[in-house]
């Protein structure tokens, strides 16, 4: 079995890194931080925000609800407070379907060549 380099994951991400992950402005990240109490970045001595993997996972859910499903902020806030597990489950299903689609497209491309 070939050696696989272990995936190293950072403990903290800057606001710029988080914004790039979702292809949004840092101002939107700060705005969502204020609007959603589940986003609780640490701050270093300079006051820079340091986001954890859990914060990023929560941003992913918020992004899905607001940007992909078109919910209002109030609707997304309600969904996150009342039934976050359902939102996570739906997001997991959608991500699985995207991964399956990507795999099928790759197989099709290989067959076409």
Image (cartoon, grey):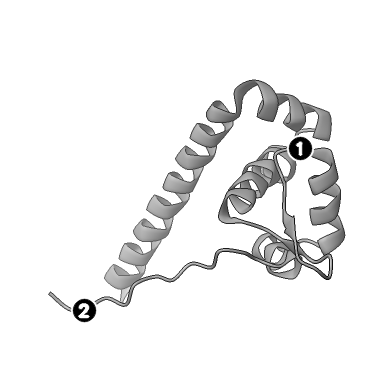
Residue at 76% over, 37% down:
37
Q: Where residue 78 appears, x then y in whole percent? A: 74, 24
Q: Secondary structure at mark 2?
A: loop
Quadrant hosting residue 87: top right
State the residue in front, 96 or 19. Answer: 19
Image position of 1 with respect to 92: above or below: below
Q: Quadrant of the C terminus?
A: bottom left
Residue at 72% over, 56% down:
42
Residue 23 falls left or right of residue 60: right
Image position of 75 with respect to 7: above or below: above
Residue 31 falls left or right of residue 83: right
Residue at 48% over, 67% down:
9
Q: Where residue 90 appears, x then y in whole percent? A: 52, 34
Q: Which mark is residue 3?
A: 2
Q: Quadrant of the N terminus?
A: bottom left
Q: Where residue 33 appears, x then y in whole percent? A: 79, 47
Quadrant hosting residue 6: bottom left
Quadrant hosting residue 103: bottom left
Q: Secondary structure at mark 1?
A: loop
Q: Which mark is residue 9?
A: none
| Mark closer to the observer (1, 2) | 1
Residue 110 falls left or right of residue 35: left
Residue 31 falls left or right of residue 9: right
Q: Where residue 49 appears, x then y in whole percent? A: 77, 62
């Amino acid at each position: 079995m070939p050696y696989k380099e272990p995936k190293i994951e950072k403990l903290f991400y800057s606001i710029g890194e988080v914004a790039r992950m979702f292809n949004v402005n840092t101002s939107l990240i700060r705005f969502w931080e204020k609007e959603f109490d589940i986003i609780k970045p640490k701050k270093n001595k300079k006051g820079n925000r340091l986001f954890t993997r859990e914060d990023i996972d929560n941003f992913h859910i918020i992004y899905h609800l607001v940007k992909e499903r078109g919910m209002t902020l109030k609707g997304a806030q309600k969904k996150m407070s009342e039934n976050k597990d359902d939102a996570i489950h739906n997001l997991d299903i959608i991500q699985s379907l995207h991964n399956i689609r990507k795999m099928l497209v790759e197989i099709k491309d290989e067959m076409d060549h």
